[in-house]
Image (spheres, rainbow, N blue to C red):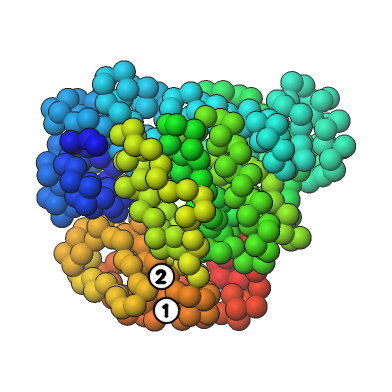
Amino acid sequence: MFKRILIANRGEIALRVIRACRELGVESVVAFSEADRDARYVQLADRAVCIGPARSDQSYLKVDRIISAAEVADVDAIHPGYGFLSENSHFAEKCRDSGYEFIGPTVEAMERLGDKNAARAMAKECGVPIVPGSDGLIESESQALACARKIGYPVLVKASAGGGGRGIRQANDDRQLRRALQEASREAATAFGVADVYIEKFIENPRHVEAQLLADNYGNAIHLWERDCSIQRRRQKLVELTPAPAMTLEKRKALCESAVRIAKAAGYTNAGTVEFIVDSKGDFYFIEMNARIQVEHPVTEMATGIDLIQQQIRIASGEKLEIRQEDVVHRGFAMECRINAEDAEHNFRPSPGKIELLVPPGGFGVRFDSHAYSGYSVSPYYDSMIGKLIVQRATREEGVATMIRALEELEVKGVKTSVPLLLKILKSEEFANEVPDVGFLERYFVK
Ligand code: ADP
């Protein structure tokens, strides 16, 4: 096991990693920006190293500063959290070249999966359903037009190096396709330095379902079941839950087992997530793999009782995965609501500032993961998420009731939050009667 770990992240996930380290008897060192200097989790770590000014391009995204912090603190490994540099293979390489274990997959696996077109081909080879689309990259306009006519409009032009919803364009006819090709490749070239694009059929109102994986360095890979993350606005997830609604046990199992096959084929190690879209018939199609821990990981932790962050650290330190697939038990229902400091009434604009009062909820089946507290200032420089409220109960009905009760108990004064919107959603007839797809939130709750 490692002696000391550097956490190259901030906020809620930094605190989450500090907690896992403490329980494992590993020292934690947090790399922080000037804006986060006074945060309590920074004090909670065994040591903290300032890596620069508030702007993330001068701190949390600065590879050299993070490596210097690792040197100063003399750590064995670096945990990247999510966002920032977590899926940057150059960063992972730099960590390992500098002698620090990167708590994540290998550089090769990251690169293999970061290329979405190649990942698609790999999924296909594993016999995993992929969205109908082009056979590889688009080389010419005529090839694109022929492909679109064959699979039928509407289609999506997607950047192979894409991420975060960028480099994706929809086209409903030939004319739009010509434009979409140019726009998507231009955006991809600017944002990712690679202009390559491929085509996928546009699936009407899909659901977003993803499988959580753990894989060690000895060829063992397991899934920890799935999460449905369809309640989202502009690709930002707001509510995540498990089990995915309106899917049979056989389908859920098939989806999760497909994810394991892809991870094994890619030589994937550590924690990862394979994303699928699910159509109205409950059929699933691979779309991509995320090579990091995700915001919504506690949903899986609560449903399975497995500490994913501890597992990440154990795997990175060279331990064998002790959990076998048959040991993983999915217990009832779990759900997460993201508590963001934002004003849903005014186009979700961020609501930074001082939290005058924060009273977290508690009680049976409730978990609140947050770095915020009464007196904490929400920085305008970063993501507006101030916490995650997670519940676990035997049934969906009980779980939703517990979540509503906990959201009503949670008190946050001084900043606007997503709580009123979350309550509106969970108490709505639409939520009770429909299976939310990715258009659900915008259709009913967001003007
Ligand atoms: P990124 O790598 O930028 O996250 P994804 O390939 O994961 O992009 O797609 C982003 C989102 O776009 C998905 O979560 C889904 O909501 C939607 N999407 C992706 N592919 C399709 C498709 N073929 N049809 C309909 N929606 C899609």
Q: How far apart are the alpha carbons under marks 2 and 1?
A: 7 Å
Q: Is residue 418 visible?
A: no
Q: Earlier in the sequence, mark 2 or mark 1?
A: 2
Q: Is residue 422 visible?
A: yes
Question: Which element type, helix, strand or loop, lies under badge 2?
Answer: strand
Answer whether labels 2 and 1 touch (C-beta < 8 Å).
yes
Q: Quadrant of residue 78?
A: top left
Closer to the camera in the image, 19 or 136? 19
Q: Closest to the observer: 144 or 369?
A: 369
Look at the picture and state if 120 lies above or below 395. above
- The kind of residue tagged 1 is Thr
Give the side of residue 181 with respect to residue 114, left or right.
right
**Residue bearing the label numbered 2:** 391
Query: In the rendered image of this protein, does residue 341 appear above or below residue 150?
Result: below
396 vs 63, left or right, is right
Residue at 82 percent across and 44 percent down: it is 153
Q: Is residue 96 above or below residue 288?
A: above
For the point 24% across and 36% down, which residue is it? 1
Q: Which residue is mark 1?
A: 402
SS class, disc 1: helix
Q: Quadrant of residue 445?
A: bottom right
Q: Nearer the viewer, residue 11 or 193?
A: 11
Give coordinates of residue 36: x percent, y percent.
19, 47
Give the residue type at disc 2: Val
Q: Residue at x 46, y 43 (%)?
A: 214
Q: Provide residue 296's location: percent of width, then percent of height.
A: 44, 55
